[in-house]
Amino acid sequence: MKNWSIRNRILFLALLPGVLVSLILGIFFISGRSSDLQDLLSQRALAMAKQLAPTCEYGVMTGSVGILQNIANSMLEERDVRAVNLYDQEMNILAHAGPRMIANRIGSTVVKDSQLQLVYTDGSVRVKAPIFAQNLIIADQLSDQFYAQPRSPEEEKLLGWAEIELSSTNTRLAQYQHIASSLSIISIVLLLCLILALRISRTVGEPVKDILRTLDDIRAGRLESRVHIHEGAELQALASGVNAMASALQRANIEYQQNIEQANRENQETIDELEIRNHELTLGRKQALEASRMKSEFLANVSHEIRTPLNGIIGFSELLERTQISERQGDYLQTIRRSSEDLLNIINDILDLSKIDAGKLIIENSAFNLRDVIEEALQVLAPEAASRGISLIQCISPDIPGQLCGDRLRLKQILTNLINNAVKFTPEGSVTVRVYPIRRESSSIQLQFDVCDTGIGMTPEQQDRLFQAFSQADASIARQYGGTGLGLIISKALVETMKGEIRVISSEGEGSTFSFTIHANIESGNNENLPALEDLSVALIEDQADWAEDTAGLLAYWQCQYQRFDSAVEFFSHCTNHPDQRPECLILSLDRSEVGAQYLEDWFTLCSDMEIAVVPIIRNGKDGDEAGLPEPSLTLHRPFTQHRLLTHLQSATGRTVQSETVSEETRLQTPPTILAVDDNEANLKLVVTLLQELGVDVLAASSGYEAVAIVSREQVDLVLMDIQMPGMSGTEATACIRDIPGKSTLPVVALTAHAMADERQVLIQVGMNDYQTKPVSQAQLARIIERWTGYTAPAETPVTIAHPGKDVGQNVIFSTRQALHHANQNMGLAVDMFGMLLDNMQDDKEKILTLWEMESLDELLEAVHRLHGATRYCGVPALRIALDKFETLLKANKATEFPQALRAVIGQIDALAQWAQDNDWEALLQEDSTANA
């Protein structure tokens, strides 16, 4: 109905009242008339029954059937009478006329006038009236005469019943005739209404159609169409509005066409300009890609060029430390070595960050032992932790499979970063590494690593600044503890690449816990062979819960029968009370302070008497502490590796070695022959010297060709191969070595200064076994030799020389001591650096103020950072601290503190400039330099 046209709506509204009125009146009158005809038939039946009953009184009383039959027959002559029945008192039929009465009743019997019984059937109306003896009296004497005598109602006597049935056929016919006539009248009225509605709808619909046709023409673009209507004021007004709209649209269309033509001309000019710009952008993109390629090459070359001299600096510094030097010279060497190592770490972090930004960080998927990775990370940081009195604790869940698939080096990098931070920010206490599975499937496992420390902790505000490049929890941390702030952002990227996440929980003054998860596949086809410790009975005395749990899990993995005791008293009491349960070996955990105690000798004597081998483990110990124990060769220092514990247990108990790894470790009783290949004479000399000090036989080659020749004629156990060499590169030389008969499995380890993305994977693919980035230390060389040849070289412990601090007040405008220190006591260099700072300082000040007014914060940060960097080498602590604070606020985007920090920087610049004018700073530098000399 909602889609009807106006004409249909008019027709509907015009016909609806007539139809409703006609139907209502027709139904009313037809039903009324039908009811009247039915009531009339019933009244006739009642009247005829009343007349019939007295007429039959005599016949019933006398029992004259003939009289009654005549009466019944005469009643059939009446209109609509269908049948007559006369009954006696017992309802026996005395006379009957007409057909048999219809028996199926409609409704119940209705009593009329307290005597007459009215019944309706399908086709008739039946009335039964009583016959009373009330009008005639018959004498008892035998006489043919009789007379009538009225009787009182009390003397009325029921003689019988008279029943008459009237047919409703004529009544129904009359009803049908009435319905037909009524419907005819209704139809005529509705027809007249329809004619009138059609005429009205045509009067309204035609103009509306004309308006719609005109609107369709306008919508189709024929704006010259108009509406012509001459009747109906409202329709004429509507037509005038439509015509006015069409005229306005026609004018607007003309203007629009003119505007389009103008816009087309301008667009064509714009397109021509865009084509020129697109061409320029294409050229710019090519230049950017070329610049990116050149940047990658530059990073590779710079990495190589920086790492090569660093390798020589670090290596020969270590060698020089072992010679006869003075304390001051040792201080200088320690400063050189630490600075070189710091520079190397910064280079590594920046290159890793470059890989992450370029999306070229590749995660390998090779088999590794998780415990080995964790132990290697702890071994690297163990000397630093021991020097600061910090305990390194590990706890690896025994539910973790022995062999996993993943990138062991990247995992080790994450652990090293987190453990190094924990050691760095822990003045005292311990650093604990816990590893446990959180979900395991048939072929994969999800692991969680927790690195907990008891250090300085962090506030919530400091935690919010974590995991951001070149940022640390506090701006003063970089000065107090060192570092670039890249370690955590690199670790976060590595964890996310391994489908995990990293988070931190920390409280200021209570320590921090860094947790991260990784997904790893379970290696099923490369299971490690279990060592020959099955059913070995071992007792463990350890009061530190995490270490006890970790060691117990390792013994269980080796299928040992172990028992843990909290103290030696408990252990010896058990052995005394249960001689048959004495273990074959005792792992005894000791504190460094207990070494040399008399009771230790007693314990070892008791164990010797009971034939129990003892493997001592010293907590927080240093090399040389084992000399105070009866069995120094079997002594371990925490943290230790599983292989060293295994070797010591086997040596103490005399068990044979079944695993391939251990047999390889013990196979080489004599020093191996190692070939060092490097085209740089200084690097080659350094590596050769470091290797010779490790007690191995060393062969040297300065090119790839010479290396191939040496391998082909000499028995070599390991090759340390440089990569970038003239003539034949390290990868080409490795490929040639693999083709030499019998040398296909010779271990080749790459030593290169490159650190670009995908390089390690490429080196492994071309046939190399491992990868080590320059500069390489003697400890790293020792680990490489032990891993690939099984030979454990005795490494000397480098001497640690304390570097005296030089604290200068924060309010000092100029410090000659700092200026000379940064210039390495070079008077001329200090004067030049401070002079350049003064020459450019005013220009830097104007630039900072201009950028501040322009609200260009990114360029402002760059300008502040540039000036800040210049002040770090000129001995101006007050200005340097102000710039450092301002730069920190800019990086943290603390806009409310910008004005105050800016005023402080400008004030310090002006103060320094004024001080330089008022003082002879060159003379002050000369005086301090002469005094230090």
Image (cartoon, helix red, strand yellow):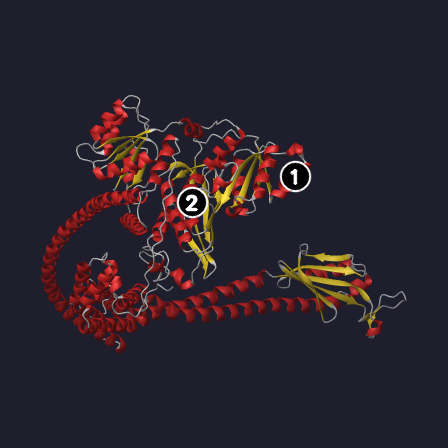
Q: Residues within 10 Å of mark 2 (few under 14, many from 20)?
A: many
The amino acid on which the numbered mark 1 sits, given as a three-letter code, is His
The amino acid on which the numbered mark 2 sits, given as a three-letter code, is Leu
Q: Is residue 721 left or right of residue 557?
A: left
Q: Residues within 10 Å of mark 1 (few under 14, many from 20)?
A: some
**Residue beneath label 2, please?**
378
Specify which label sits upstream in the sequence, 1 or 2.
2
Q: For residue 762, say whether it is visible.
A: no
Vertical position of residue 703 compared to residue 269: above or below: above
Q: Is residue 375 left or right of residue 58?
A: left
The image shows residue 477 at horizontal and vertical percentages of 36, 60
Check the picture and name the quadrant holding the N terminus: bottom left
Q: Viewer-proximal residue, 6 or 933?
A: 933
Q: For residue 623, say whether it is visible.
A: yes
Give the residue displayed 60% in from the left and 31% down from the top: 611
Which residue is situated farthest in the right direction here? Answer: 141
Q: Is residue 481 left or right of residue 167?
A: left
Which residue is situated farthest in the bottom direction here? Answer: 233
The image shows residue 164 at horizontal and vertical percentages of 69, 62
Corner quadrant of residue 37: bottom right
Corner quadrant of residue 82: bottom right
Secondary structure under tag 2 reads helix
Vertical position of residue 500 compared to residue 575: above or below: below
